[in-house]
Amino acid sequence: MANLLKNGKTLKQARDEILARTEKTGHYNGLKKLEFKERDPIGYEKMFSKLRGGIVHARETAKRIAASPIVEQEGELCFTLYNAVGDSVLTSTGIIIHVGTMGSAIKYMVENNWEDNPGINDKDIFTNNDCAIGNVHPCDIMTLVPIFHDEKLIGWVGGVTHVIDTGSVTPGSMSTGQVQRFGDGYMITCCKTGANDESFKDWLHESQRSVRTPKYWILDERTRIAGCHMIRDLVMEVIKEDGIDSYMRFIDEVIEEGRRGLISRIKSMTIPGKYRKVAFVDVPYAHKDIGVCSEFAKLDTIMHSPVEITINKDATWKLDFDGASRWGWHSFNCNQVSFTSGIWVMMTQTLIPTSRINDGAYFATQFRLKKGTWMNPDDRRTGH
C-alpha cells in the first residue's frame, strides 16, 4: 500500500470516513465548530485572502502563456485547490463549472486506487477530459497536480482550459456532429502524463498528433501546468508561514463554512415551499441540412428538463429533476457531476455570489437525478 496519507489508510478509506462523518453530523467532516476561525478570525481571513488571491493571480498570469483566443482573450480557464480526497477548497475566477468536474476526476482516481497503480507521487502530472466521469465537454482539458508536504499527500491543484480542438468527427471547440462517445475525439481518462514536473515525451507526441491544432494544444497544456505549479508553490509558502496544522484545519473549515454559507443565503433570500419549472430543447436531427455520422440518429427529439425545488423551513433544499428525458443519440448528454456543477454556475451568480466557492454548497444540497436520463446517463456510449 502506498500510504500517501502517512496514517495507514488508503485515500478511499479516508474519503469514506469523511463522507460518513458528514452524513452522521450534518457538518462537513464532522466539524460542528470552526475552531480556527473562532480562535483566530484574522489569521483565518488572512490565510483565505492569501490563498484565494494567489489562485486568481496564477490564473491571470498563466493565461498569458496560451495563444488560443478561447483561453487568452475569452478567459476560458479555471484553477481550483482541493484537499487530498478531491473536495474543492478554493477556486479562481473563470469557468467555475469545473470546480466539480476536476474534483470528480480526483475522486475517480481515489475510488479506483490510482495510488498503487499507476502511482501518485510528488511532482506527478495527470490529465483528464473523460465526460463519463464528470467532465462537461471533451474540449475541457484538465491538468491535475498532487501537493505533498513532508512526503504526505495534503491536496491537489487542478487547472482546466477549453481547447480549440480534440480531433472529434467535426472540427472546432464545441463539436456537435458526433452522436456517440466514439466520435467525441481524443479521450483521456485520468492519465499520468508527467513526472518530476515534466511532461512525458510519448504523451506530448501522441496528444499533439491526435488533434487538428497541435500548436494551440501544447500552449494550453503549458498554461495549465504553469498555473498548477504556481498554486502548489503558493501552498508551500502558506504552510511555511502559518504551519501545516493551521493549513490542514483551514481547508476543512472553509468547506464547512461554504456549506453554512449556502444555508444562510437560502434563509435570507427564499421562502419555504415548492417551486416548479419546465424547459424544453429541440434536437432537429431529422432535418435534411443536419448531418450526423450515424443514420439511426436522424431523429427529431425534444429534451425535457423539469425541476421541482423544495425549500424546507430549516433552509435545507432538494432539487428534483424527475421526469427528464432519457439520454439520446446526440452530443447534448451530460454526466451528473457536470450537471450539478452547472447549477453552481447559476448559484454563484444568484444565491452565493461570494469568493468562497467550494464543495461546501454541494454538501448542503440534495439532488435527485434519475438514472438513464440525459443528465445522468446509464450507458457509456453517450456523446457529449
Image (cartoon, rainbow, N blue to C red):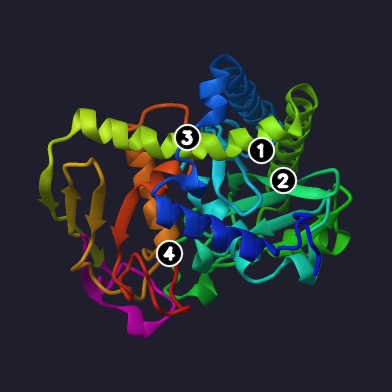
Cα–Cα gap, marks 4 and 3 = 34 Å
Check the image and report above or below for 25 versus 131: above
Q: Report if the CB atoms under discs 1 and 2 are less than 8 Å apart.
A: yes
- The residue beneath circle 3 is 33
Cα–Cα gap, marks 4 and 1 = 31 Å
- The residue beneath circle 4 is 335
Which residue is situated farthest in the bottom direction here? 296
Q: Nearer the viewer, mark 2 or mark 4?
A: 2
Which residues, given as a range, are shown in magenta?
Answer: 284-305
Of mark 3 and mark 1, the one earlier in the sequence is 3
Q: Amino acid at mark 1?
A: Met
Q: Which label was assigned to residue 248?
A: 1
Residue nearest the viewer, comparing 356 with 215: 356
Of mark 1 and mark 2, the one earlier in the sequence is 2
**In-image side of 312 versus 240 (left or right):** left
| Helix, strand or loop under label 1 | helix
